[in-house]
Image (tube, helix red, strand yellow):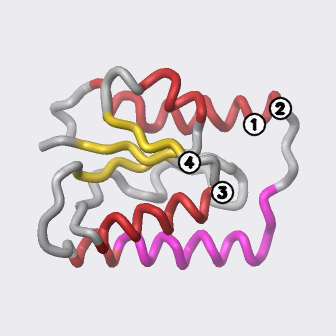
Amino acid sequence: MGKILITNNPLVKEQLSKYIVIEYYEIEYLDILKRVRDKIHLGHKLLSHPLSGSVKPNETPYKSIIISKDKGKLDYESLMVIEKSIETAEKFLRNFKTPNWTENILLDFQIIDLSLIKDVVIDRSII
């Protein structure tokens, strides 16, 4: 099964593009979730959890999510997970906006996001 990594993290794009097809977008965290939802409606299946890790949606601007490359029938489990994830992210962002972080802190968040997804991408047997 082929995979696509959807991300807004330039470090993920730079370091993982030789291992997996990457769709890179310069959009916000919540918009990444919505882009993944749109792909699920087209028949892609969610292969990594949208809210993985302990960093809250209003703390980091970066998110990387793996979906199936192949399209099939609408996967209702994937749809339910992404919809609930969008709802959760909206709740966090409504209560506390993401701060305007310094470049060093933004790089730290890029590294955290990369570390959460890197092993999954490189060790292809995981998914």
The residue lying at 58 percent from left, 39 percent from top is 9
First in sequence, mark 1 or 3: give its number.
Answer: 3
Q: Nearer the viewer, mark 4 or mark 3?
A: 4
First in sequence, mark 3 or 2: give its number.
Answer: 3
Q: How crowded is the residue under tag 1: few (<14 C-alpha within 10 Å), some, or many (20+)?
A: some
Disc 2 + disc 1, Cβ < 8 Å: yes
Q: Which residues are magenta?
A: 81-98
Residue 82 on the magenta segment: yes
- The foreground one among 20 and 46 is 20
Asked whether, in this view, residue 123 is left or right of residue 53, the answer is left
Identify the amino acid type marked 1: Leu
Q: Nearer the viewer, mark 3 or mark 2?
A: 3
Look at the numbered disc 2 and give the secondary structure of its residue: helix
Look at the numbered disc 3 and give the secondary structure of its residue: loop
Identify the amino acid type marked 4: Tyr
Q: Which residue is mark 2?
A: 103
Q: How crowded is the residue under tag 2: few (<14 C-alpha within 10 Å), some, or many (20+)?
A: few
Q: Quadrant of the N terminus?
A: top left
Disc 3 + disc 2, Cβ < 8 Å: no
Q: Position of residue 42 (x, y in %)?
A: 27, 69
Q: Which residue is mark 1?
A: 106
First in sequence, mark 4 or 1: give its number.
Answer: 4
Q: How crowded is the residue under tag 3: few (<14 C-alpha within 10 Å), some, or many (20+)?
A: some
Q: Quadrant of the C terminus?
A: top left
Q: CA distance from mark 3 to mark 2?
A: 16 Å
The residue lying at 35 percent from left, 28 percent from top is 119
Residue 25's disc is: 4
Disc 4 + disc 3, Cβ < 8 Å: no
Q: Which residue is mark 3?
A: 28
Q: CA distance from mark 4 to mark 1?
A: 16 Å
Asked whether, in this view, residue 80 is left or right of residue 83, the answer is left
